[in-house]
Image: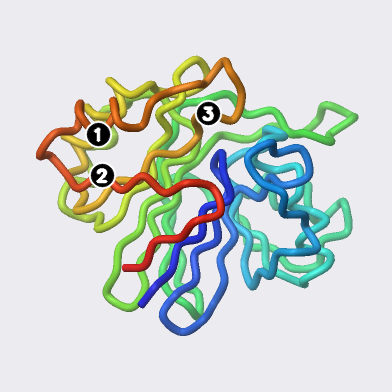
Amino acid sequence: MAKLSYHGHSACTLETDDGTKLVIDPFFADNPATELTVDDIEADYILVSHGHFDHFSDCIPLAKRTGATVIGTFELVSFCGEKGVESGHGMNIGGAHDFPFGRVKLTPALHTGSVAGDDSGTHTTDCAGFLIEFGGKRFYHAGDTALIMDFQLLKGRVDVALLPIGDNFTMGPEDAARAVEMIQPKVVIPIHYNTWPVIAQDPEEFRRKVGSAAEVRVVEPGDSYEF
């Protein structure tokens, strides 16, 4: 069984069937949805969708402490390397790579892409989602994104999908429900909501909008889901 542990906002740990720990969008120190810190988290790989602080702020300290390999766009991984991260694997949108635990493909996400901590302002990056395949399972983390037609390319290729529903900075519940119609995952888990008042949402309203299109699992921060 694989296990998804949700840390609030977009941060989660995906533990694959073989015990490999993938931390996605690490955000702990300033995350009001969790009391966890970087020192509480173990990681073999860190996947970062983009450079905004609420997805990237704890990537570098976590990578340095654990020795985890950072996976993300080439520019973001290069920035991590400049800051002393020893192991990274840069990719680009649409590209895929086989890792020891499985296959990762960077998918399109429509969002802005500054890099938190880049004082020089020389780094920028496109935003991405992650389609992760391991042990016959297909897991999709959309990252921060608007509703995009590219979701249709994922139709029939996703077992468990994590989609943002917070609105304001990403798609809201209505657009996320339309994304579910395009992707047709077996299970969808809402993320990126209720961290701050500006992205407050009722996940039960999202469930109602999705209807019978997919099974909606609401995973609270600190809880987990096995599949």
Answer with left or right where residue 193 lies relative to residue 146: right
Of labels 2 and 3, earlier in sequence is: 3
SS type, badge 1 = helix
Mark 1, Cα crowd under 10 Å, few <14 / some 14-19 / many 20+, is many
Residue wearing tag 1: 207
Task: Specify the farthest residue to the bottom.
Answer: 18
Relative to the observer, which residue lies in front, 30 or 86? 30
Q: Which amino acid does label 3 sit on?
A: Asn
Q: State the image coordinates of residue 68 (x, y, percent, origin top left).
A: 70, 69
Do the numbered discs 1 and 2 sit on residues whose CB atoms are within 8 Å? yes
For the residues labelled 2 and 3, the Cα–Cα distance comes to 17 Å
Q: Residue at x 58, y 24 (%)?
A: 112
Q: Residue at x 22, y 55 (%)?
A: 157
SS type, badge 3 = loop
Q: Residue at x 22, y 37 (%)?
A: 180
Answer with left or right where residue 37 lies relative to residue 139: right
Residue wearing tag 3: 194
Of labels 3 and 1, earlier in sequence is: 3
Q: State the image coordinates of residue 5 (x, y, percent, origin top left).
A: 51, 60
Answer with left or right where residue 95 lies relative to residue 84: left
Query: Which image quarter is the N terminus in?
Result: bottom left
Answer with left or right where residue 45 lies relative to residue 111: right
